[in-house]
Amino acid sequence: MIEKLSIKNYLIIKEVELNFTDGLNILTGETGAGKSIILDALSMILGERANFSLIRKGEDRMVIEGMFDISGMKSVKTFLRENDFQINEEVLIMRREIMRKGVSRNFINDSPASINQLKLVGDIMVDIHSQNEHQALLKKETHLSILDSYAGLEKEVLNYGNHFVELSESIKKLNEMISGRSEMVEKKKYYNFQLKEINEINPLAGEYEKLEKILEKSENREEISIAISETINLFNENEKNILSQISKSLKNLERVGKIDSEISEILKEVNEAYIILKDAYERLISFSADMDFDLNEIEKIRDRLGTLSFLKKRYNRSIDEIIEFANRLKAEIEYAENYDEEIEKTEKLISEKKGTLFKLAKELSQKRLTIAKEFDRKTNGYLKEIGLAGATFKTMIKNNTAETENEYTIDGNIMLSSKGIDDIEFLINTTKGGDFTSLKKTASGGEISRVMLAIKAALAGKDEIPVLIFDEIDTGISGSTASKVGKLMSELSKKRQIIAITHLPQIAAISDNHFSVSKKDEKEITTAEITIIRGEQKVEEIAKMLSGEKLSENSKDTARELIGGHI
């Protein structure tokens, strides 16, 4: 619940701190005193947009801070953990600071936060209802979500939605394939041309580097031959050549190696050197024999390197990369040759996905039909409690259909949408024997307020949002109806914390916590003042709401009767 709301330099509010309690928290006061401003300030720390024009005249900065009890809210703690915010097991603090120079800073538990993060965590904790919310109730598009919320179908709807996204992606792919058929024909021609060009040259892996080495060896053969010849001569020019001298050394060391173990180790090393040098000598002999180059062959190598260089330049790739590119071209050509078959496969896949989706949609629809009866019964029960006994609420559910078949239709013209196949609308009949019509066409402002309250009462045991805020939800009602509305709000407040603005004494009287909002003019600036009232102060406030500023003992007595045990 909301424990504390601090507001500084916001419009006509200089600095206030409101300490809310559980139960029913009521704000009353004359028009323009600042009641709605308080709820607007609360909305801002819950993610609503704000700007520097809201800063109190003469001030540079506005600060709004809310303290929330989250001791039993696992979902809030999960959000904080997943978004790397500090976690206090009992309390959450949200703060916004807005400067006149246009800078805005937002915090969750003293860590910087985005507007979206404020909104996400706010949506978990607080449900705000105002006249604009009533207008939302008139929109048919919201009705399906309300029913799903009551039914607790969020997981099923999410699962269905994931399947719908997969279907949409497949349909998009199919449309792209169909529209790209002619383009694919042209691509195939071009791919074939490229592959033919590469295949005619037939580059081999590592070929370019190998030929470059042969050519380099050929171009430097004279220098290489001289160096090799001189080295070979050192090995075999006379009986004192390198190998014979080392061989002689080995024999000498073998004689004395048995006497001294260290000499034996040296003998091994000299023997290894002899083997290495002998191997090098033999390789030099072999290399020397290969130094005779065929000039015609060298010319062919030059031509081949020129052809490969052309290929490298044309495709801006190395030879190995061109070979890999050719393999990809083969795959693309094969895909193009089987393009129509791929379209058929995608069409079959879409048909299968639509079948799966239709099955899920029908299961959702059946659950909605079943739960709608319970929802209607509960809502109608609450409507009777708040003075709309002659009205009947009904949830109409029918198949969502399309005039003509398209990618998303199935079983005739039934239309698959992102939330199923259901077209849902709340209807109401306000007179016995009358027809059911849409809320927009039938309900007055006062009736809409009560329908909203009845729906929230029906939802009270289903959703987990701990705080309900009502901004003048009692518009258009009075008398005994107001008392009934107040009674229902009081019942709701036993399950949820409620904060409400009201002009009705019947509702204000039964508050658990009552704030009186007033304003005063001082030095050419208006300032809102907020006071918690109890006892006789509350009696006088209710009496004023009954009879105006002029108090009488009769109005006070009536106020006491209304207040009863809520003093």
Image (cartoon, rainbow, N blue to C red):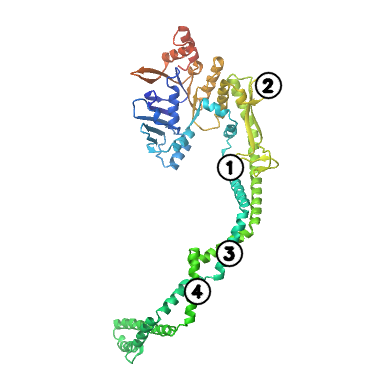
Residue in the picture at 39% in, 23% down: 12
Find disc 1 in the rendering and name its residue. Answer: 161
Find disc 4 in the rendering and name its residue. Answer: 304
Residue in the picture at 47% in, 36% down: 120
At mark 3, the secondary structure is helix
Residue 404 is left or right of residue 526, and the answer is: right
Q: Count neighbours of disc 4 (C-alpha within 10 A) and say few if under 14, some if 14 to 19, many if 20 or more.
A: some
Residue 398 is left or right of residue 450, and the answer is: right
At mark 1, the secondary structure is helix
Where the N terminus falls, by quadrant?
A: top left
First along the sequence among labels 1 and 3: 1
Where the C terminus falls, by quadrant?
A: top left
First along the sequence among labels 4 and 2: 4
Q: Amino acid at mark 4?
A: Arg
Q: CA distance from mark 4 to mark 2?
A: 94 Å
Q: Which mark is residue 409?
A: none
* Quarter of the rendering containing residue 16: top left
Residue 353 appears in the figure: yes
Find disc 2 in the rendering and name its residue. Answer: 434
Q: Amino acid at mark 3?
A: Phe
Q: Amino acid at mark 2?
A: Gly
Q: CA distance from mark 4 to mark 1?
A: 60 Å
Find disc 3 in the rendering and name its residue. Answer: 193
* Quarter of the rendering containing residue 392: top right
First along the sequence among labels 4 and 1: 1
Residue 108 appears in the figure: no
